[in-house]
Image (cartoon, rainbow, N blue to C red):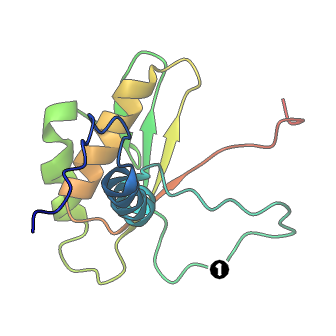
Amino acid sequence: MNAPKQSKGVLADINIIPLVDVMLVLLIIFMITAPMMQQGLPIDLPKVTTKPLPSKDEVQTVTVTKERAVILNTKKVDIHDLKVAIELLFANKSNKEIFLKADSGVPYGFVVNCMGIIREAGVEKVNIVTRPPDEK
C-alpha cells in the first residue's frame, strides 16, 4: 500500500509572523527608551511674578558679558578658575543655587560650557535669568 505521492511545488508564500514579532518587540523597546533619551535644559520660568521670591541666603550670580568675561557676583573670574571659585563660595552652604545671566550676543556653546562648569562645582540648581520679551 503505497500512499499516492502528491507533487508539492515551491512554496512561494512569505511567512510574515516572525517579522511582525520582531517589529512589535522593537516598537516596545523604542517606546520604553524614547522618554529616557530626551535631554534639554531644565528651565522653569514663571509666567507672571508680582514681587521677587524671598531667598534664605544671599543670591549668587554668574554673569557672562558680550566679550565672554565671566563675573562671579562682583569679581571677574577666568573661565578656567570658575569651578574652584564656585566650590570655595559654596563650601559652607547647604543650599547650592546660582543664577546665570548671559548676554544675548554670547554664543550658546560658551553659556552651556559655563553651566557645565557650575554643575561640576557641585551646584544643584542653576537658574537662567531672562527678561520678558516686551521689556527693553
Outermost residue, front direction?
Answer: 1
**Residue lying at 34% horizontally and 45% vertically, measured from the top left:** 115
Q: Mark 1 points at which residue?
A: 54
Q: Residues within 10 Å of mark 1 (few under 14, many from 20)?
A: few
Image quarter hosting the N terminus:
bottom left
Relative vertical location of residue 73 with respect to residue 54 in this rendering, above or below: above
The structure residue drawn at horizontal position 55% and vertical position 27%, both measured from the top left corner, is 103
The x and y percentages for residue 112 are 37, 37
Q: Is mark 1 on a helix, strand or loop?
A: loop
Q: In this view, does 132 lie above or below 37?
A: above
Number of residue marks: 1
Residue 59 x %, y %: 49, 65
Residue 63, by quadrant, is top left
Residue found at x 35% / y 61%: 21
- Left or right of residue 118, residue 16 in this image: right
Residue closest to the eye, 121 or 5: 5
* Residue 78 in sight in this render: no
Residue drawn at 37 percent across, 80 percent down: 95
Q: Quadrant of residue 8?
A: top left
Q: In this view, does 92 lie above or below 122?
A: below
